[in-house]
Image (tube, rainbow, N blue to C red):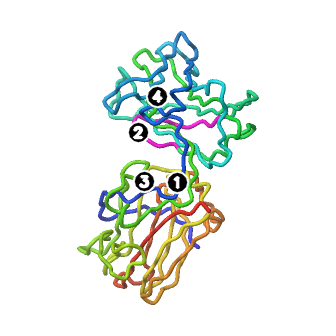
């Protein structure tokens, strides 16, 4: 095992190589209001300084928009109330919110605005639990384990709310634009397969595939056709002269995964790594598979024992050859397992 704070470098290729499978979900709000949302009602607070409702925006119809006025200092928010019914979230593992921050009248100076928001759940007994996060102007998906919402009965949820913290600044009117809210239960999250390498937009925005290679050597190729591939026909090939490659994305919460699984075909020992948003990485050395496709499983505990915080993973898959850049290495069917 190796800990590293080294930076990625080399040829950068933008790719969509992330896709979600093995996922069941309950939609609280999904841009065109779900049946639950239609049967619920919205309440904004404080009433004098906060607006709440569905609006048509360039990003789509019926966006759920929560706006706080310039003269509000502190928290303002909006809640969805289940209108006399209760929802059972006890069989789900995560709360997922797709949102972005809209700032009217601000002098941006090319710097993204950032604001604190709270996501809250309330049960039938009036108990409230919240998670505070940072929301930026760029659209993002916020994923948090439901286990973080402590002290409430997840089998009897009545309300979901979002609060925005505003500062007193006359040229700012902040709005949280909510495009989707759901609770999910994942069994498998696929990082690299034939389908996800080409067609699927990742949940947190476009991924970037980095290669680190000797001078004038080709980068990693995620579209290499290999008839012997364990899954489909395309594999991630690390060619001769290229030391390795990695996938980077906006930080996502992988705190509830149990393991990382993938197939490896290598003529040399390799270093497998995951890294957080700061660049801190934890590595596991994997011996050569003697050029035979071999299934590999890295337990999440091996990564957390090395000090990695799985709740803020930005470098979601990294493979580096050890000692010999000319040796062949291929990878296929990379996925995170939640079971």
Secondary structure predominantly adopted by residues drawn in magenta:
strand
The Cα atoms of the two marked residues, 3 and 1, are separated by 20 Å
Quarter of the picture holding the C terminus = bottom right
Q: Residue furthest bottom?
A: 290
Q: Position of residue 49 (x, y in %)?
A: 52, 13
Residue 110 falls in image quadrant:
top left
Vertical relation: 141 (above or below) 130: below
Which of the marked residues, 2 or 1, is nearer the chain's N terminus?
Answer: 1
Quadrant of the drawing holding the N terminus? bottom right
**Could you say which quadrant of the image residue 171 lies in?**
top left
Earlier residue among tags 3 and 1: 1
Other-residue count near label 1 (Cα within 10 Å), few / some / many at <14 / 14–19 / ≥20: few
Q: Earlier in the sequence, mark 4 or mark 2?
A: 2
Q: Are marks 2 and 1 in contact (CB under 8 Å)?
A: no
Local secondary structure at mark 2: loop
Viewer-proximal residue among 75 and 47: 47
* Few, some or many residues within 10 Å of mark 4 (<14, 14–19, 20+): many
Q: Nearer the viewer, mark 3 or mark 4?
A: 4
Residue located beneath label 3 in the image: 249
Q: Residues within 10 Å of mark 3 (few under 14, many from 20)?
A: some
Range drawn in magenta: 130-142
List x then y, in percent, for residue 307.
63, 61
Q: Which residue is mark 1?
A: 23
Please say if the residues under marks 3 and 4 sit with CB atoms less than 8 Å apart: no
Asked if residue 259 lies left or right of residue 100, the reply is: right
Instruction: Say which mark, if any, is on residue 176.
Output: 4
Cα distance between the residues tagged 3 and 4: 22 Å
The answer to whether marks 3 and 1 mark residues whose Cβ atoms lie closer than 8 Å is no
Disc number for residue 139:
2
């Amino acid at each position: 095992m190796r800990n590293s704070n080294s930076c990625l470098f080399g040829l950068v290729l933008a790719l969509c190589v992330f896709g979600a499978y093995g996922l069941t979900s309950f939609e609280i709000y999904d841009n065109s209001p779900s049946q639950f949302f239609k049967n619920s009602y919205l309440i904004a607070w404080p009433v004098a300084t906060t607006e709440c409702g569905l609006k048509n925006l360039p990003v789509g119809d019926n966006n759920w928009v929560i706006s706080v006025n310039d003269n509000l200092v502190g928290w303002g928010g909006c809640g969805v109330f289940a209108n006399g019914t209760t929802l059972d979230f006890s069989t789900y593992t995560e709360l997922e919110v797709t949102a972005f921050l809209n700032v009217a009248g601000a002098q941006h100076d090319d710097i993204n605005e950032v604001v604190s928001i709270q996501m809250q759940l309330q049960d039938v007994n009036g108990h409230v639990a919240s998670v505070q996060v940072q929301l930026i102007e760029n659209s993002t998906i916020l994923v948090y384990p439901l286990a973080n919402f402590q002290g409430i009965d997840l089998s009897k949820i009545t309300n979901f709310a979002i609060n925005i913290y505003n500062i007193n600044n006359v040229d700012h009117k902040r709005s949280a634009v909510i495009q989707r809210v759901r609770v999910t239960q994942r069994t498998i999250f696929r990082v690299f397969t034939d389908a996800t390498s080409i067609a699927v937009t990742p949940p947190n925005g476009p991924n970037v595939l980095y290669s680190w290679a000797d001078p004038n050597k080709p980068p990693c190729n995620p579209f290499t056709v290999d008839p012997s591939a364990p899954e489909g026909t395309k594999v991630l090939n690390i060619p001769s002269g290229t030391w390795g490659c990695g996938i980077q994305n906006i930080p996502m919460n992988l705190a509830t995964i149990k393991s990382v699984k993938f197939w490896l075909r290598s003529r040399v020992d390799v270093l497998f790594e995951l890294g957080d948003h700061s660049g801190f990485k934890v590595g596991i050395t994997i011996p050569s598979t003697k050029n035979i496709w071999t299934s590999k499983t890295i337990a999440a505990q091996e990564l957390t024992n090395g000090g990695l915080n799985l709740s803020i993973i930005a470098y979601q898959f990294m493979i580096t050859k050890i000692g010999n850049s000319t040796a062949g290495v291929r990878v296929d069917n990379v996925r995170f397992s939640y079971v």
